[in-house]
Image: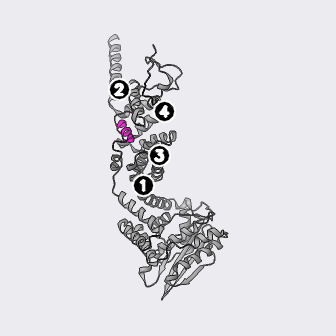
């Protein structure tokens, strides 16, 4: 019996030593131990999330990093890696929100620049993913009632012999969205979201969008009203028609129609938009009416180039889209819509083939980069540089994060010396900037 007992004791000791040794050499094990000791320690959670990400445990990384972000919304590293991990698991909405947070609180300029471009490309991917999800959940969405003052404008449909005018389908839809958005009582669906859904369900592929297809699109995009518009070319004249469809009932208002020549295109668009406001019973203030009357450009060729840029962008040809937007801006430097789209196209184009490793490399020798490197070796380094960072590193050598004791314990941990309150937070201390460290070691 003594021999068996000795063997059991020996095995337990060996197992304990092996476990301790493994934790000492495995960064994730060290950081998991630090989190277990103090689950509210932001530095430990952040470092563990980064370590999970580096180990390609993306779902675990997102969970831990989102917890760190909730505890400290101003922590840039947590937000950045939460975005990267969310992208990997396909949660593009969470990725976008996390990246936007990094733009607000992140401290490394080069990383912020990289993320700005990535957000532009991510928006298009998110719109496409949401469109696919809407179609997949069409049965459920069809039973959800939406506010009639949430309105969507799909691409218009062009009919006529001059196919060079076909890109106006998108350009005029963009103008209508911009003008309708000037009424605070309306919630207008973003063009990119509507375009992604239109592409997914092949809206208007037959050359006409009737009330039934408009109702379907409205339910999928969760809009209460949808504008079904057409551009008809007849000889040297055009006619712009728009039909306001109630998504819940399928009913339509009286057609809003405005004929004219190509040179009168902007006046035609304004006439139709004001008719839609009347059908929606929205009273515009004089200032709102004046803002809607304002033309985005007086140069028709610039607007055509802008419309072609939208067409190329929707097809994923970002370099071509950028050239069209640049052409529109060169024809009219005051065309702000073209300038904004040019920046978006260029940013999206630049980030399309940028791997996440390039974003991480952009940290360089920054304080945030130091945090990431520390996490890779199991050290939940605090954020900061200069004297505070030096003091933090000294404090961590004396008080290693891997042996942190939670401040919520009812009594002192066995075999560990008690520490004064300021030094018991395990890696999240904010030492004085005097450059002086005071260490109190009490007799156990």
- Mark 3, mark 2: which one is toward the viewer? 3
Give the numbered dot on residue 116.
Answer: 1
Residue 368 part of the magenta-drawn span: yes
Q: The magenta stretch spans which residues?
A: 363-379
Above or below, 13 against 46 in this view is above
Residue 331 position within the rendered picture, expressed as x and y whole percent measured from the top left: 42, 74
Residue 64 position within the rendered picture, expressed as x and y whole percent measured from the top left: 45, 40
Tags 3 and 4 in contact by the CB under 8 Å rule? no
Dot 1: element: helix
Dot 2: element: helix
- As measured in the structure, the alpha-carbon distance from the residue carrying label 1 to the one carrying label 2 is 44 Å
- Mark 1, mark 2: which one is toward the viewer? 1
Please tell me which residue lies in front, 40 or 283: 283
Give the numbered dot on residue 90.
Answer: none
Give the numbered dot on residue 19.
Answer: 2
- Mark 3, mark 4: which one is toward the viewer? 3
User: Which of the two labelled residues, at mark 1 and mark 3, occupies the earlier sequence position?
Assistant: 3
- As measured in the structure, the alpha-carbon distance from the residue carrying label 3 to the one carrying label 4 is 23 Å
Above or below, 60 against 195 in this view is above
Residue 389 in sight here: yes
- As measured in the structure, the alpha-carbon distance from the residue carrying label 1 to the one carrying label 4 is 32 Å
- Mark 2, mark 4: which one is toward the viewer? 4
Residue 378 part of the magenta-drawn span: yes
Mark 3 residue crowding within 10 angstroms, few (<14) / some (14–19) / many (20+): some
């Amino acid at each position: 019996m003594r021999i068996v007992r000795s063997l059991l004791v020996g095995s337990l000791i060996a197992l304990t030593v092996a476990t301790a040794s493994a934790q000492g050499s495995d960064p994730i094990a060290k950081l998991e131990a630090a989190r277990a000791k103090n689950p509210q320690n932001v530095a430990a959670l952040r470092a563990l999330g980064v370590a999970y990400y580096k180990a390609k445990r993306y779902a675990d990384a997102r969970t831990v990093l989102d917890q760190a972000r909730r505890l400290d919304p101003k922590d840039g590293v947590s937000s950045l890696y939460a975005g990267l991990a969310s992208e990997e698991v396909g949660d593009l909405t969470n990725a976008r929100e996390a990246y936007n947070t990094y733009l607000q609180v992140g401290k490394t300029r080069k990383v912020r620049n990289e993320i700005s471009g990535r957000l532009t490309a991510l928006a298009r991917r998110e719109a496409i993913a949401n469109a696919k999800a809407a179609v997949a959940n069409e049965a459920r969405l069809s039973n959800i009632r939406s506010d009639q003052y949430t309105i969507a404008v799909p691409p218009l449909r062009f009919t006529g012999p001059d196919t060079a005018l076909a890109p106006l389908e998108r350009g005029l839809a963009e103008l209508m969205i911009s003008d309708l958005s000037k009424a605070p009582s309306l919630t207008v669906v973003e063009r990119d979201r509507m375009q992604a859904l239109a592409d997914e369900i092949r809206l208007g592929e037959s050359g006409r969008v009737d009330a039934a297809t408009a109702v379907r699109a409205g339910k999928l995009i969760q809009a209460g009203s949808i504008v079904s518009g057409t551009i008809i070319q007849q000889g040297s004249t055009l006619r712009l028609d728009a039909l306001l469809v109630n998504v819940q009932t399928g009913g339509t208002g009286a057609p809003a129609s405005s004929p004219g020549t190509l040179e009168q295109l902007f006046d035609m668009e304004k006439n139709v938009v004001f008719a839609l406001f009347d059908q929606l019973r929205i009273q515009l203030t004089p200032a709102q009416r004046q803002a809607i009357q304002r033309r985005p450009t007086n140069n028709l060729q610039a607007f055509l180039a802008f419309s072609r840029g939208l067409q190329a962008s929707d097809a994923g040809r970002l370099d071509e889209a950028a050239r069209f937007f640049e052409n529109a801006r060169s024809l009219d430097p005051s065309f702000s819509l073209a300038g904004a789209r040019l920046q978006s196209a260029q940013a999206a184009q630049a980030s399309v083939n940028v791997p996440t490793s390039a974003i991480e490399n952009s940290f360089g020798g920054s304080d945030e980069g130091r945090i990431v490197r520390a996490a890779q070796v199991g050290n939940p380094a605090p954020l900061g540089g200069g004297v505070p960072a030096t003091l933090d590193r000294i404090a961590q050598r004396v008080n290693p994060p891997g042996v942190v004791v939670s401040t919520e314990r009812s009594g002192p941990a066995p075999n560990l010396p008690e520490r004064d309150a300021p030094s018991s937070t395990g890696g999240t201390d904010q030492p004085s900037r005097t450059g002086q460290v005071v260490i109190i070691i009490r007799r156990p």
